Image (cartoon, rainbow, N blue to C red):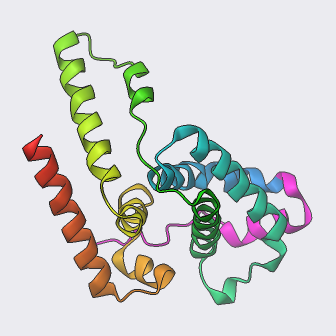
C-alpha cells in the first residue's frame, strides 16, 4: 500500500532552493499544494471565506519563511502542514468561539445533475454530513481534516499533533462512527 503521508512534487528540493532566491519560482509549489492546504483549512474552520483567507495567510507565511526550511529536518509537506496547523489554530484561538457550520452557502451550490430530486437528496446528504462534522470536537475535526482532506497517514498526523499513532486511529474511528450514527439517524 502506498503512503500519501508526504506526497511531494517532482524536483521539489530544486524548486524550493530556487524559490528561496526567486519568489516567482514558488508558483509550482503553490499550485501543487494549494488544494490540500485549502481543504485542510476548510475542514478546520468550516467557512469557505475564512478558509480562503487562511490559505492565503498560510502561503504568504510559507513564502516569507521559506529560507528557514531545511530538507534534512523532514519533508517539505510536513513543514508546510505544520505551518498550516499553527496558523489555523492561532486563528481559532483569536476567535475564542467554537466554530459552527454555516449551511447557508450550501443552498447556493449548483449540481451538474439534471434531476432536481437527485440534487435535493445530494444537498441534504451534504448538509447532514457537514452538520455531523460540525458536531465533532475541534480535535476530531482537525484529525478528520488531516486524514481525509489532506491525505495524511495516521503516522504523519501523529507526528504533527504529538498524539500516539494508535490514539489518532481511535479518534478517527470514533469520529467516523459518530458521523455515521448522525447520518443514519437523520
* Coordinates of residue 56 in the picture (x, y in percent): 70, 49
In the picture, residue 169 is in which quadrant? bottom left
Q: Residue at x 62, y 70 (%)?
A: 86
The answer to whether 95 appears left or right of 134 in the picture is: right
Which residue shows up at 8% across the image and 45% down it?
A: 185
Quarter of the figure with the N terminus: bottom left
Highlighted magenta segment, given as a residue range: 1-24
Q: Is residue 176 above or below residue 119?
A: below
> In this view of the protein, which residue sits in the foreground, 24 or 184?
184
Q: How many marks?
A: 0
Q: Nearer the viewer, residue 102 or 126?
A: 102
Q: Position of residue 75 (x, y in %)?
A: 59, 78
Q: Is residue 13 left or right of residue 172?
A: right
Please state the horizontal and vertical placement of residue 14, each as a whole percent of the image. Answer: 75, 69
Residue 21 belongs to magenta span: yes
Residues 51 and 35: in front is 51
Residue 104 % position (x, y): 42, 27
Relative horizontal placement of residue 52, taking residue 168 as reference (left or right): right
Q: Could you tell me which residue is drawn at 67 percent across and 89 percent down? A: 72
Q: Residue furthest front?
A: 97
Amino acid at each position: 500500500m502506498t503512503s500519501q503521508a508526504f506526497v511531494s512534487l517532482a524536483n521539489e528540493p530544486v524548486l524550493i532552493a530556487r524559490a528561496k532566491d526567486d519568489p516567482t519560482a514558488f508558483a509550482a509549489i503553490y499550485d501543487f499544494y494549494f488544494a490540500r492546504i485549502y481543504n485542510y483549512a476548510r475542514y478546520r474552520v468550516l467557512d469557505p471565506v475564512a478558509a480562503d483567507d487562511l490559505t492565503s495567510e498560510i502561503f504568504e507565511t510559507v513564502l516569507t519563511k521559506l529560507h528557514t526550511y531545511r530538507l534534512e529536518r523532514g519533508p517539505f509537506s510536513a513543514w508546510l502542514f505544520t505551518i498550516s496547523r499553527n496558523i489555523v489554530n492561532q486563528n481559532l484561538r483569536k476567535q475564542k468561539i467554537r466554530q459552527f457550520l454555516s449551511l447557508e452557502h450550501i443552498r447556493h451550490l449548483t449540481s451538474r445533475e439534471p434531476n432536481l430530486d437527485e440534487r435535493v437528496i445530494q444537498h441534504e446528504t451534504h448538509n447532514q454530513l457537514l452538520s455531523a462534522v460540525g458536531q465533532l470536537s475541534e480535535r476530531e475535526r482537525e484529525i478528520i481534516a488531516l486524514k481525509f482532506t489532506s491525505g495524511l497517514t495516521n503516522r504523519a498526523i501523529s507526528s504533527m499533533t504529538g498524539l500516539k499513532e494508535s490514539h489518532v486511529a481511535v479518534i478517527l474511528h470514533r469520529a467516523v462512527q459518530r458521523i455515521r450514527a448522525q447520518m443514519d439517524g437523520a
